Image (tube, grey):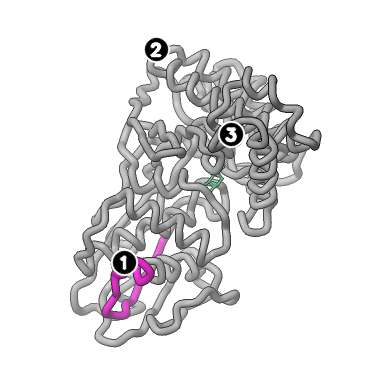
Amino acid sequence: MKEKILAEFKKLFGDYGDIRCYFAPGRVNLIGEHTDYNGGHVFPCALTIGTYAVVRKRDDRKLRFYSMNFENLGILESSLDDLKPEDTAGWTNYPKGILWAFHKRGMTIPNGMDMLLFGNIPNGSGLSSSASVEVVTGAMLRDLFGFDVSNQDLALIGQFSENKFNGVNCGIMDQFAIAMGRAGHAIFLDTSNLSFEYAPVSLENAKLVISCSNKKRGLGDSKYNERRSECETALAELQTKLSIQSLGDLTEEEFEANKDLIKDETRIRRARHAVTENQRTIKAVKALKANDITLFGNLMNASHISLRDDYEVTGIELDTLVEEAWKIDGVIGSRMTGAGFGGCTVSLVKTDAVDTFIEQVGTAYKNKIGYGADFYVVEIGNGPERI
Ligand code: GLA
C-alpha cells in the first residue's frame, strides 16, 4: 500500500524533499452503542483497515489536499490563514479541523503542506472513516512538527474538532478506539472518566464479520444530535430527584424505580436504552473475560433489539442484516455498530460458517432491499503509526 500511495503523491505533488507516510485505523464497536455521550461504557476495537496519509511540508502557508477516494475533486487548495469549514470540499474539513484544533491548543503550525489521503474503510459506513482521518492527521502533525501530545490527546483533539469545526456532537468513542488501538484487543472504556482497560479478544474458531448495508449516512444529517438531546432532557428530569451525573450512573433497577420522573414515553425508551446498554457492556466484558462467548453473543443480540425498539436507530437495512444473521447456525451474536441509520453490522461467526453467512445474508439482503451488502472479515489492529 505504501508504494502505491507514495507513487501517487509523487505524481501529483512532485518527487523531492522529506515525504512521510502514516496510517490510522478504522474502528468497530463490539458493544456499548450510544452510551459514550451518556457517561457509560463502550467496547470498541481498532481495525487493520483505515486511512493512509502521505505528506510533505511546504515553505509557504498553502495547504494542498488530495484524496484517492474522491479523485474527481482533484487537488483542493486552502491556506493555514483560512481555516474554516467549507461546503464544497466536504472531506477536507476533517484534516482542516485538526489543524485548526492544534492551533486552538496553542500548537502553532508554521508550514503549509501537501497531503494525500487514501482510505480502505468504506466511506460513511459507520466504521469511523472520519475519526480515522482526524487521528491520522493528528499523528502526522505531531511527528512533522515535534508536538508533545499523547495518543489520548490525539483522540480528544479529534473529538473537539469534530464537535466544534464539523458541527457533529459525537462522543469520544471513535477517536479513542482509533488513537489507542491495540492489535488483538478491544478497549473497555468508561466514558465518564476515560479510565480504560485492554481486553484480549482471542476468538478460537470464530471471526468478526462486518456487513456493510451500503446505505449511506452522515452523522450531521442523521438523527444523532436529536437522540443526544433526548437523553440530556431525560437526564435533567431524573436529576430533579436523583443525584446522578449521567444515565450511565444508573442500574437497571434504579432506572425502573425512577423512570416516571421522565415525562414523555419516547424519552423513557431512549433513556432505558442508555441505561441497559451500559449494563450490557459491563456484563459482556465480564463474559468475554470468563471465556463465555455464547453469553457475549446473546448480549450483542440484546443490544441490537434495544437499539431497534427503544433507541430507534436501526432501520430496515440494518434490521434485515441482523435478523438474517440470527437465522444462521454458527452465528454467535450480531448487532448494528456505530451511530446506526445505515452503515454496518458486526457479527461473531464461527469460522466454518463464515462462507454460508456471507452467501445467505447477502442473498436475503439483496432480495429484500434491492441492492447488495458488502462483507469484511476483519482483524483487530493497532493505533496510528508512521509507516
Ligand atoms: C458515532 C459517534 C460515537 C458514538 C456512536 C454511537 O460513531 O461518533 O461517539 O456515539 O456513534 O455509539
**Nearer-N-terminus badge (2/3):** 3
Q: Secondary structure at mark 1?
A: strand
Residue underneath mark 1: 54
Q: Is mark 3 within 8 Å of ligand 1?
A: no
Q: Quadrant of ligand 1?
A: top right
Q: Amino acid at mark 3?
A: Leu
Residue at 32%, 77% (x, y): give it.
Answer: 113
Q: Is mark 2 within 8 Å of ligand 1?
A: no
Residue underneath mark 2: 290
At label 1, counting other C-alpha atoms closer than 10 Å, the crowd grade (few under 14, some 14-19, many 20 or more) is many
Q: Is residue 62 left or right of residue 225?
A: left
**Residue 281 can be seen in this image:** yes
Front residue of this view, candidates 213 and 238: 238
Q: Amino acid at mark 1?
A: Val
Range shown magenta = 102-118
Residue at 68%, 53% (x, y): give it.
Answer: 222
Q: Amino acid at mark 2?
A: Ala
Residue underneath mark 3: 247
Quarter of the figure with the N terminus = bottom left
Q: Position of residue 147 (x, y in %)?
A: 23, 64
**Nearer-N-terminus badge (1/2):** 1
Q: Position of residue 36 (x, y in %)?
A: 52, 40
